[in-house]
């Protein structure tokens, strides 16, 4: 128990020496830590532990505490230390993660002390079930599943207009309102699946760094690429993935010419182009073919906002500034232009939900709904000036 006393001096020492890293060691004890707000969450081990498991658990702790306390910081821990102890008792046993789903924990660990005592005598069957993320006896009048495919594009374009790096980070989110204990099977246009089954027609995608919710049967996915699962009730993230691909970017030059190089049927909403300007610029004047442009002096940038940007369209903006002094460009640097946007009903990668099968012993009819959204991630365009 006293080992944790060595953590902060060790952390400060490594920080001063510029050798700070996620794992710190003191003798035979290793500290694995993360920082959230003004808190350090630290796990200790004297074995060759699975570091990925430990860090996944630490981030899960942050997620659960945030669900309970809204904000996770020093004050919220002090105000709720009884609940924290109760949660830690259920989240981990003998160094092994146990029930980590906040929705299930909230069934028997509440903020009121009186309810905590009652809960100890009767633990929900969910905790001892093989399906610990879903309660039994759930009923809905109308059975529906909503599927959101959300992709963020990260792009870095150099001053010559060449794409230096680009990738797509995606996630598939569910909102499940189904009765009973249904089994769902999700089909995607996965290149590996199509190769296994001998089908290569149509567009397929190769997903990397795939991460699943604990409900997905991993052995089934590894054997035949079927995404089979009993879903949590309500909202959840079924999976996340990354796709390395060459993304066609919008072409923007310094007199602010923007063209939507995506298909004409799609429309980008709430487009925001942020163009950096010198810190001593003044007397701004703007002329735009669409949208609104404004100067934000505290951030040294022009923000051009376009509510609706159809594919294939081209818009222009001209800006005029006075430069009362000449400053050293090298000292000030050349920040990149950044772009924000959201394109509904469209995915850059071309990933598609081919089917969603819902199997439940009572045989009720259910409706699956699918929605696709592409949004900007870290989208930067470098300039020469």
Image (spheres, grey):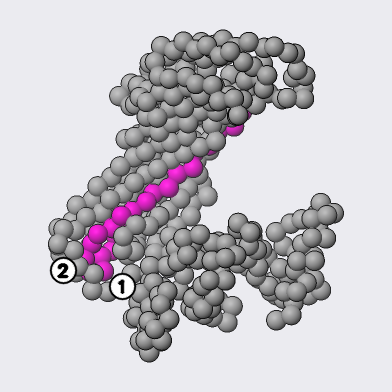
Q: Position of residue 27 (x, y in %)?
A: 81, 74
Give the residue at mark 1. 135
* Image quadrant occupied by the N terminus: bottom right
Q: Classify 264 as above or below 375.
A: above
Label 2 environment density (alpha carbons within 10 Å; few <14, some 14–19, many ≥20): few
Label 1 SS: loop
Please tell me which residue is depicted at 55% across the width and 36% down the height of the picture: 378
Q: Classify 317 as above or below 13.
A: above
Give the residue at mark 2. 362
Label 1 environment density (alpha carbons within 10 Å; few <14, some 14–19, many ≥20): some
Please tell me which residue is depicted at 65% across the width and 70% down the height of the picture: 43
Q: Is residue 181 magenta?
A: yes
Q: Which secondary structure is most common in the magenta stretch?
A: strand
Residue extending furthest toward the right: 17
- Asked if residue 250 can be seen in this view, the reply is no
Q: In the figure, residue 277 lies in which quadrant?
A: top right
Label 2 SS: loop
């Amino acid at each position: 128990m006293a080992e944790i006393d060595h953590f902060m001096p060790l952390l400060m020492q490594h920080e001063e020496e510029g050798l700070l890293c996620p794992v710190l060691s003191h003798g035979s004890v290793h500290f694995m830590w993360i920082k959230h707000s003004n808190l350090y969450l630290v796990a200790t081990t004297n074995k060759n532990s699975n570091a990925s498991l430990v860090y996944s658990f630490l981030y899960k702790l942050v997620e659960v505490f945030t669900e309970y306390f809204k904000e996770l910081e020093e004050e919220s821990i002090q105000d709720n230390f009884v609940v924290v102890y109760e949660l830690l008792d259920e989240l981990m046993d003998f160094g092994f993660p146990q029930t980590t789903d906040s929705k299930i924990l909230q069934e028997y660990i509440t903020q009121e002390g009186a309810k905590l005592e009652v809960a100890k005598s009767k633990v929900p069957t969910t905790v001892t079930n093989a399906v610990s993320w879903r309660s039994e006896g759930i009923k809905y009048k109308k059975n529906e599943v909503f599927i959101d495919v959300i992709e963020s594009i990260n792009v870095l374009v150099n001053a010559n207009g060449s794409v230096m790096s680009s990738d797509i980070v995606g996630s598939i989110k569910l909102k499940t309102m189904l009765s009973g204990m249904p089994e769902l099977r999700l089909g995607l246009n996965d290149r590996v699946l199509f190769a296994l089954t001998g089908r290569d027609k149509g567009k397929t995608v190769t997903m990397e760094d795939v991460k699943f919710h604990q409900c997905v049967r991993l052995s089934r996915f590894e054997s035949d690429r079927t995404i089979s699962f009993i879903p949590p009730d309500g909202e959840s993230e079924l999976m996340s993935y990354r796709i390395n691909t060459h993304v066609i970017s919008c072409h923007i030059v310094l007199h602010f010419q923007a063209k939507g190089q995506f298909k004409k049927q799609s429309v980008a909403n709430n487009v925001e182009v942020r163009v950096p300007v010198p810190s001593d610029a003044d007397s701004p004047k703007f002329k735009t073919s669409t949208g609104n442009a404004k100067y934000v002096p505290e951030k040294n940038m022009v923000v051009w906002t376009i509510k609706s940007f159809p594919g294939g369209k081209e818009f222009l903006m001209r800006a005029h500034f006075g430069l009362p002094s000449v400053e050293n460009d090298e000292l000030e640097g050349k920040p990149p232009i950044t772009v924000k946007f959201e394109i509904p009903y469209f995915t850059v990668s071309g990933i598609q939900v081919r089917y969603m099968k819902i199997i439940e012993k009572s045989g009720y009819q259910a409706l699956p709904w699918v929605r696709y959204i592409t949004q900007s991630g870290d989208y930067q365009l470098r300039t020469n000036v």
